[in-house]
Image (spheres, helix red, strand yellow):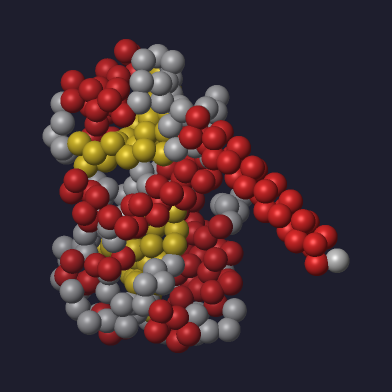
Amino acid sequence: MKSLKRSFFLFVLASFTVALAVAGGIFFSRPPALVLSDLSFDVLYGPWRGLLRQAEASLRLFRPVKKVVLAENAGSEMVIFALEDASSHPWAVLAPYRYARGLRDYAEQHPETPVVVLGGRENIREGQLLSLAVDTRLDSYRAGRSAAFFSRGKEGEILVFQEERDFPVNRDAFLAGLRAEDCDVNPLYMSGYTDYTGYDKLSCVVVGSNAQTFLSRSNAAPVILFSWLDPVFFPENVRLVFDDSPWGVSVEAFRAAFEAGGDPVPSDAFLPFGRIEQAGRIWQGDGLKKIKAIVKEGFAQ
């Protein structure tokens, strides 16, 4: 009996090893996806966080995802050289809008490779070149529902920081999100440079633009932050983050490259769990389950 069990165990172990080897062979034989980045972004995004996102994207796409690092002001020739040096026949390329000119030139020289430029106002496709927009309407709706959730049972304003020229928060969608959670509060919108004094009368704050004055103050109001910065830089009261960086939307962006039409992609909404000691106090009861459900849902038509 022991001999039979041992043989069966060895058979299972051998089968698993073979399956793993075959899967690994297929994985590494597939053309890589390339993500263009720069040193400043890598530092501010968080090196370990970037590596985790890279590994996650590789597993979800089941192919190697390679990071290509350049200077922020790299010209077209350097962009093309770096991408060609990383892979002669990549599966697809993704990069932020600041490299748009270089990516356009690369797409002209490599018409067989889908290229995604992240950060346009709307989705525009020219051959294999896709200018991909972030779905600010859906992000704003999810932020509105989340703000209503964080404000529940509290008195005070819901404050939204944003600039006219840089509108990550769609006001109509944000308001629709509040109302979807039966919140009848009308949010207060203001510039991040406004000297607001009623910080002690806030039930929730949404930061969609520069609000350094607010973030530097000691305040207990829950904060919803639109930012790709490493969460280690955030104040302790940041409860929800919308990350619209290339790493934040990489999988959806690569998939959009192969779709005929394609909608804008939503930001990656995540809960900054870096402060484990606060988790029990912040997410009591079914709060964690509720907020996860909110950020995963689409826009209510």
Provide residue 240's location: percent of width, then percent of height: 41, 67
Residue furthest front as drawn: 3
Residue 115 lies left or right of residue 73; in this view the side is: right
Provide residue 119's location: percent of width, then percent of height: 33, 38
Q: Nearer the viewer, residue 175 or 25?
A: 25
Q: Nearer the viewer, residue 71 or 161?
A: 71
Residue 145 lies left or right of residue 160; in this view the side is: right
The answer to whether any part of residue 123 appears in the image is no
Q: Is residue 241 above or below residue 137?
A: below
Q: Is residue 32 above or below residue 177?
A: above
Number of numbered callouts drawn: 0
The answer to whether any part of residue 60 appears in the image is yes
Q: Which image quadrant: the N terminus?
A: bottom right
Residue shown at 19%/46% (left/top)? 39
Provide residue 203's location: percent of width, then percent of height: 38, 79
Residue shown at 24%/50% (left/top)? 42
Residue 79 lies left or right of residue 263; in this view the side is: left
Residue shown at 31%/49% (left/top)? 167
Q: Nearer the viewer, residue 255 or 205?
A: 255
Residue shown at 57%/52% (left/top)? 298
